[in-house]
């Protein structure tokens, strides 16, 4: 029952959240810049989460085989109400993006799944809430695309 409830919540949240993943345009000259734009400024009462292996707020990945997973740690002792996930592709291509909230009881909930027809160095972001109302201990960003496509991911948590 618990598992089916979490799956149902994840499906409902994914359906609702799909509309929220939108592009944030960056002013560019006709040719895309050689380096990606920096992270946007923090929103009020928000922090960038740190990737678990590097401790960095934004991580660059290159698709090798299948998909790439990136986990961001959610700090304890602070109650976050929402999360902003960001994808910045380095290639104009399709990117299959999935976002999971991982809970400390071993369960998880998929809160977003969409194929994004992305443009190079155009940041895509979406706002998400925990479908269960519980705070996750990690946010998993799962991205797949054609081999050797590169991208950057980041997650902001807001109180």
Image (cartoon, grey):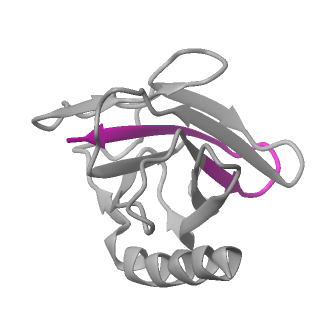
Residue closest to the eye, 107 or 111: 107
Closest to the observer: 127 or 28? 127
Foreground pick, 144 / 37 = 144
- Splitting the image into 4 quarters, where does residue 139 fall? top right
Which residues, given as a range, are shown in magenta? 141-159
Which residue is painted at 29% across and 43% down in the image? 80
Location of residue 76 (image quadrant): top left
Question: Where does the C terminus fall, quadrant-wise?
Answer: top left
The reply to whether residue 94 is in sight is no
Q: Residue furthest front?
A: 1
User: Quick check: can you spot residue 114?
Assistant: yes
Q: Where's residue 19, x and y in %?
A: 35, 79
Question: In the image, residue 85 lies at what x, y percent?
Answer: 41, 49
The residue located at (54%, 15%) in the rendering is 55
Residue at the limit of the structure toward the right, as seen here: 65
Side of 13 where 54 appears, left or right: right
Q: Quadrant of residue 38?
A: top left
Residue at left offset 29%, top offset 31%: 78
Q: Position of residue 10 (x, y in %)?
A: 55, 74
Residue 9 covered by magenta stretch: no
Q: Is residue 40 above or below residue 115?
A: above
**Where is the N terminus found, in terms of image quarters?**
bottom right
Image coords of residue 27 (percent x, y): 22, 44
Q: Residue furthest top?
A: 55
Closest to the observer, 148 or 59:
59
Majority secondary structure in the magenta region: strand
Count of labels shown? 0
40 over 19 or under it: above or below: above
Drawn side of residue 156 relative to residue 66, left or right:
left
């Amino acid at each position: 029952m618990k598992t089916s409830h979490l799956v149902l919540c994840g499906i409902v949240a994914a359906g609702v959240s799909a509309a929220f993943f939108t592009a944030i345009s960056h002013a560019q000259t006709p040719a895309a810049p050689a380096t990606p734009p920096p992270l946007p400024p923090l929103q009020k009462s928000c922090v960038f989460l740190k990737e678990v292996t590097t401790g960095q707020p934004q991580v660059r990945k290159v698709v090798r085989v299948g998909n790439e997973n990136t986990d961001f740690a959610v700090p304890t002792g602070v109650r976050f109400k929402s999360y902003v996930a960001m994808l910045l592709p380095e290639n104009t291509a399709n990117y299959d993006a999935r976002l999971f909230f991982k809970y400390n009881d071993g369960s998880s909930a998929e809160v977003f799944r969409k194929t994004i027809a992305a443009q190079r160095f155009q940041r895509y972001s979406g706002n998400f809430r925990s479908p269960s109302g519980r705070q996750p201990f990690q946010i998993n960003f799962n991205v797949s695309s054609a081999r050797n496509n590169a991208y950057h991911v980041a997650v902001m948590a807001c109180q």
